[in-house]
Image (tube, rainbow, N blue to C red):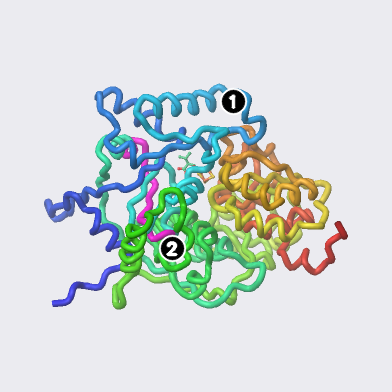
Amino acid sequence: MADKPLTMAEKVWREHVVVPGEEKGGQRTPDLLYIDLHLVHEVTSPQAFAGLRLADRPVRRPDLTIATEDHNTPTLEIDKPIADPISRKQVDTLRANAAEFGIRLHSLGDDDQGIVHVVGPQLGLTQPGMTVVCGDSHTSTHGAFGALAMGIGTSEVEHVLATQTLSLKPFKTMAITVEGTLKPGVSSKDIILAVIAKIGTGGGQGYVLEYRGSAIEQLSMDARMTICNMSIEAGARAGMIAPDETTFDYIKGRPHAPQGADWDAAVENWRALRTDDGAEFDAEVVIDADALEPFVTWGTNPGQGVSLSDTVPAPEDFDDPVDRESAERALKYMDLAPGTPMRDIRVDTVFLGSCTNSRMEDLRAAAGIIRGREKDPQVRMIVVPGSQRVRLQAEAEGLDQVFKEFGAEWRFAGCSMCLGMNPDQLQPGERCASTSNRNFEGRQGKGGRTHLVSPVVAAATAVRGTLSAPSDVLSTEPQPA
Ligand SMILES: CC(C)[C@H](C(=O)O)[C@@H](O)C(=O)O
Ligand code: SF4
């Protein structure tokens, strides 16, 4: 009998089972999976290393473990000691742990330092078919390569450090099929914001999402990473995209990519990862890419979003009492009145950065909108490359000049204003158009208000001062340089 057709996620899972779970009292115990790549940052690792030290255990596979500093790092004056004592302590602790346990660390000032989810793919460490974990929810980013990539908690970080394995319960599978072609000015961020608005922040719970369809196949790796990054905002365990020529072209030649005959063998294996014809998903959601417009959030969770040409909804628009109450609370926090056109919302700050949208393509797209134009004088714009490599490449292309001439601040790499763990924060009541992934209350600073947007919407908003689509800006002539 022919084998049962499998989804990509099931294939990767099967390849990694070290000890299968057992049926016990009507319930299945978790499988023990082998982990191919463990990414580490300063926030979720201190207690894990402390646990190892206490048990007198080494790190099992330091060669499959790599650390970077990102959340607590400043993006200005990086040659000075970190001013905040808590941030400094976290970073110093990571440095001491990496030295003691023999783990490669990319520290502030190093060319390979940056946000953990930007650094892994950039080095060619993230590869199709791998299991990738990190003590960070946005580990789902790496699924863009056809890896099974999951965020884990600190006790699991300790387990992986000690054993290079992880106990996991099987998941359900959901296909997110996106067919068609995106209109100009619409990007992968708009796809994922629309997906989350559709299925809700809990809609993906217990599932691994597989994004597929002609619109996904047309996307670059940078754009695919944006989508997989936000899978966790739909509550999913992970997000994946089948590896294809775009994936192989991206990986080829990177520092950790297989070489020579190994490369050919790897590509052959990677090609076999895609979901088999006839494989069954537990659920499917279909999105029409042709109908999508730039998408922005109005509320305080990533599912509270609408098209930019819509208006702020009213709590009464929601049938579910929980949604209604959450909308009411969000509108109060965001200081927005129902019926207000989204385009009339004025912002104070524009943040271009975070592991969602701080790669080369994001910076190029934003620079393309603002080149030769003037920033709204009341708006402050911060541009934070996701890694030092991205910063250096952007500088080689002259993008830093484009941003600076426009009046934006050009920073060093890190999580920055994505979350309030470093000096880049919103003031209470400040409103921000942000290319990051979370708009929770206080996320970007106490009392700060966040609208999640794509890089080109962020750029257009910085030009006009109000939430804007690229087409709103491109209809006016740029100033002669
Ligand atoms: C600090 C870290 C644990 C956290 C996460 O897991 O995602 C952060 O990266 C975030 O985006 O909120
Ligand atoms: S950039 Fe933001 S979402 Fe990404 S890891 Fe850092 S804090 Fe988390």
Q: How crowded is mark 2: few (under 14 residues within 10 Å), some or many (20 or more)?
A: many
Residue 235 sits in quarter: bottom left
* Residue, far right: 480
Q: In this view, does 71 lie above or below 147?
A: above
Disc 1, SS: loop
Kindly identify the amino acid type of the residue bearing the numbered disc 2. Answer: Phe
- Residue at the (13%, 54%) spot, across then down: 23
Report the residue marked by disc 1. Answer: 82
The nearer-to-camera label among 1 and 2 is 2
On residue 248, the disc is 2
Q: Is residue 371 left or right of residue 135?
A: right
Which residue is rendered at x = 70% and y = 61% of the image?
342
Q: Which three-letter amino acid code belongs to the residue tagged 1?
A: Ile
Looking at the picture, does residue 225 appear above or below residue 75?
below
Is residue 107 rendered magenta in the image? no
State whether residue 356 is above or below residue 195: above
Q: Is residue 362 in sight in this rendering?
A: yes
